[in-house]
Image: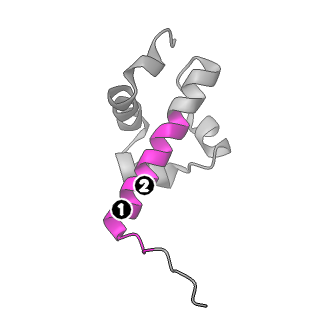
Amino acid sequence: MKTKQLPQQTPKQLEESTRKQILETYVDIVMNVSFFPTRGHLLEAGISRDKIRHHFGNISQLRHAAKESYPLSFQGVL
């Protein structure tokens, strides 16, 4: 009996998947602590500075992308 192999993600799909995962983690932190996460918070969640820079350029651009993707999550955030 042969086992099915899952289709391999293309580099573009992997990049988009990682980007989405970073955004979701950022938004989860925002919703739990009600303020914008620092690099330290993100590092504790497994998101390094290099990942932020690679996928978003900097933490400000990550914040902007998160606000655009999940605007309701930022209501009442300091």
Q: Amino acid at mark 2?
A: Ser
Q: Position of residue 69 (x, y in %)?
A: 35, 31
Q: Is residue 6 left or right of residue 54?
A: right
- Badge 1 element: helix
Res. 13 mark: 1
Tell me if residue 54 can be seen. no
Segment colored magenta: 7-26
Q: Amino acid at mark 1?
A: Gln
Q: Which residue is mark 2?
A: 17
- Badge 2 element: helix
Seen at 52% across and 80% down, the residue is 4
In which quadrant will I find the N terminus?
A: bottom right
Q: Is residue 6 left or right of residue 32?
A: left
Q: Position of residue 44 (x, y in %)?
A: 67, 43
Question: Residue 3 sits in which quadrant?
Answer: bottom right
Seen at 56% across and 48% down, the residue is 47
